[in-house]
Amino acid sequence: MEKNKKLVAALVVLAVIAIGLGVLTFTQFKKNTEMSELFAVEKEEMENEYSTFATQYDELQVQINNDSLREKLESEKLKTQRLLEELRQVKTSNAAEIMRLKKELKTVRAVLRSYVMQIDSLDRLNKVLVQENTEVKNKYHAATAQISTLSAERKKLNEKVSLAAQLDATNIVAQPLNKRGKTAKKVKDVKKIAISFTIVKNISAETGNKTVYVRIAKPDNDILSKGNTTFAYENTHITYSIKKYIEYTGEELTTTVYWDVEEFLPAGTYHVYLFADGNMIGQGSFSMK
C-alpha cells in the first residue's frame, strides 16, 4: 500500500514536470517564431536598401566623366550586389549572419555618402544633377516610401513580440453579494460585487509593483465609476471602476477586488475588463436578475 502511494506521488510529480516543460517549450517556440518573422521583415527591408544603393551607384556612374572614379563606383556597386545576393541566400533563422550583413549595410551607406559628397563638389556633376533632379527625387521618395512601409511592418512585429511579455489574467469571476456578504439572488439585494482573478505566471514579464485597473460595464455599456477616475490607454484616457495595486514576482497571483454598490443596478449581463501596463489583460462577464 505504501509503495502504491509513493508510485502515485511520483507519477503526479512527473506529470507536473511534463506539463511545465510543455508550457516552456510552447512559449519558447512562440518567441522563436515571432523573432523569425521580425527578422524576415528586417531582411526584406535590408534587401530593398541594398538594391536602392546599387541603383544609385549606376546613376552616379552615368553622371560623371572621370574614368578612375567610375571604376571605383563600379567596384562598390559590385560589392553591394554581392552583399545583396548573400543576404538573399541567408535564412531568416540565421540571426548572426543577418546582423553581419546589417553592419555591412552601414558601411555601404557610409561609402556611398562619401562618393556623393565627392561628386557633388564637381561642377560638371552639378549641371547633370539639376537636369535629373526630379527623376532622382522620385526614385528616392519611392524607395523611402517602401522602406517606411517595411519599418511599419517591423514595428507591428516588435509589438507582437512584446505581447509575450505582457501580463495575462484568467479565472475572472464576479459574485454579487448582499449586505450579509452572501451571494445575492436578486439585483435589488446586491450591496457589493466581488471580482476575483488570477495573474498567470510569466517569466518574460517585468516584475515589481503594478496597478491593475478594473472596468465594470453595465448592460448598456456604461462604466461603473465613482467620480473622475481614468487611466491612460492607447493615447487616451478611459474610465475605470476599481484600481488595485499588486506586487508581481513573475509567479501566479490570485486576488479579489470589491465594488460597493451605491447606485441603481439594472438586471442583465455585465462585462468586466482588466488592464495593466497599458494593455487589456483579461475580460469576463456575469449576469444579475
Image (spheres, grey):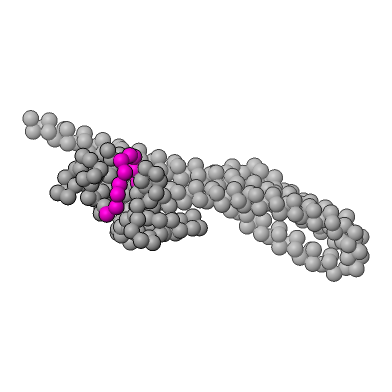
Quadrant of the rendered structure where residue 117 is?
A: bottom right
Magenta-tinted stretch: 262-274
- Magenta stretch encompasses residue 271: yes
Relative horizontal placement of residue 88, taking residue 212 as reference (left or right): right
Picture residue at 23% right of the left edge, 47% below the top:
190
Residue 278 percent coordinates (x, y):
43, 55
Please identify the quadrant where the C terminus is shown. Answer: top left
Relative horizontal placement of residue 142, taking residue 268 as reference (left or right): right
Query: Of residues 239 and 1, which is closer to you in this image?
Result: 239
Picture residue at 58% right of the left edge, 53% below the top:
99
Residue 39 percent coordinates (x, y):
57, 47
Query: Of residues 242 and 60, which is closer to you in this image?
Result: 242
Picture residue at 84% right of the left edge, 54% below the top:
135
Residue 173 percent coordinates (x, y):
28, 43
Relative horizontal placement of residue 281, taking residue 153 as reference (left or right): left
Please identify the quadrant where the N terminus is shown. Answer: top left
